[in-house]
Amino acid sequence: MKREDLRLYFICGSSNVEGDTLKVIEEALESGVTMFQLREKGQDALEGKALVNFAETIRSLCRKYDVPFIVNDDAQLAERVGADGIHLGQDDQTVTSLSPYFDDKIIGLSVRDRYELDRSELSAVDYIGTGPVFPTHSKDDAGSTIGVEGLAEMRSRIKELPMVAIGGINTENFRSCLRNGADGVSFISAIAEAEDVGQAVRGFLK
Ligand code: TPS
């Protein structure tokens, strides 16, 4: 994976969008997001064949725009639909227990702070997602915020490992994340809930 792929990392599932999720994802891809993660969570989350179909459609969209397609948490789904990688949390399966399919795929891991860093097996990890930097309403168990100070501290500990900032990031505060050691910024609501998705993405890219 290229470090630059983390620049503008959009994460989305069907519960994050009020209207047509695929339309929002395509608009974001077309407008220039550099990486995409399917995170299908919540009460009305798609399951079974419907989830596979949804993921396959998104994989095709990501290919069309030449953007890496990452699946959150579900290694079986990632492998089944031929995703470019997987993103795991601290409570998900370990990065070292992934199938050989992932040997040449992108592996991301959420690492909030130095305590999580100490218990993470980073040798197989291509990038980490660090946060929540700011308050977020998109993840119930996100924990307390780490601020840009938390990002800067993480950068000093991980040396050159690619790191994307996450949690409550928007068009106002994303620059402070990049100034404090993040290679890129990722977000759900700033794009999924934007009135004009294309305008929101282009606002970040400017
Ligand atoms: C790359 N995570 C931490 S905070 C948050 C999520 C999903 C909510 C952000 O929503 N790093 C990566 N992927 C992940 N899934 C996580 C961390 C976990 P909002 O932008 O609306 O605040």
Image (cartoon, grey):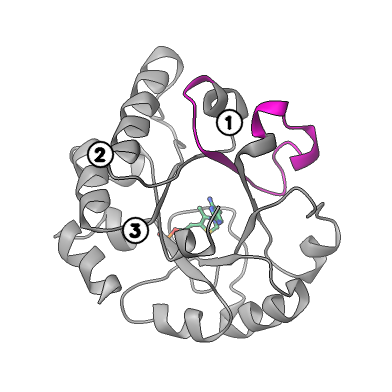
Instruction: Return the x and y of residue 165 as percentages of the image width and height.
Output: 53, 68
What residue is drawn where x is 45% and y is 37%?
A: 42
Does label 3 or label 2 sit earlier along the sequence?
Answer: 2
Does label 3 or label 1 sit earlier along the sequence?
Answer: 1
Q: Secondary structure at mark 2?
A: helix
Q: Are marks 3 and 1 in contact (CB under 8 Å)?
A: no
Mark 3 to mark 1 CA distance (whole Å):
21 Å
Question: Is residue 90 at all visible to an observer of this figure?
Answer: yes
What residue is drawn where x is 28% and y is 53%?
A: 192
Mark 3 Cβ and ligand 1 under 8 Å apart: yes
Which image quarter: residue 65? top left
Q: Which mark is residue 74?
A: 1
Mark 1 to mark 2 CA distance (whole Å):
19 Å
Q: Which mark is residue 21?
A: 2
Q: Is residue 204 left or right of residue 182?
A: left
Does label 1 or label 2 sit earlier along the sequence?
Answer: 2
Q: Does the magenta run of residues contain 89?
A: yes
Residue at which label 3 appears = 189
Question: Is residue 99 at all visible to an observer of this figure?
Answer: no
Q: Amino acid at mark 1?
A: Asp
> In which quadrant of the rendered image does the C terminus lie?
bottom left
What residue is drawn where x is 62% and y is 76%?
A: 146
Instruction: Return the x and y of residue 202 as percentages of the image width and height.
Output: 21, 68
Residue 152 vertical placement versus 104 (above, below): below
Magenta segment? 80-102
Which image quarter: residue 59? top left
Question: Closer to the camera, 78 or 131?
Answer: 78
Q: Nearer the viewer, mark 3 or mark 1?
A: 1
Residue 109 vertical placement versus 150 (above, below): above
Q: Is residue 189 left or right of residue 119?
A: left
Question: Closer to the camera, 87 or 79?
Answer: 79
Q: Secondary structure at mark 3?
A: helix
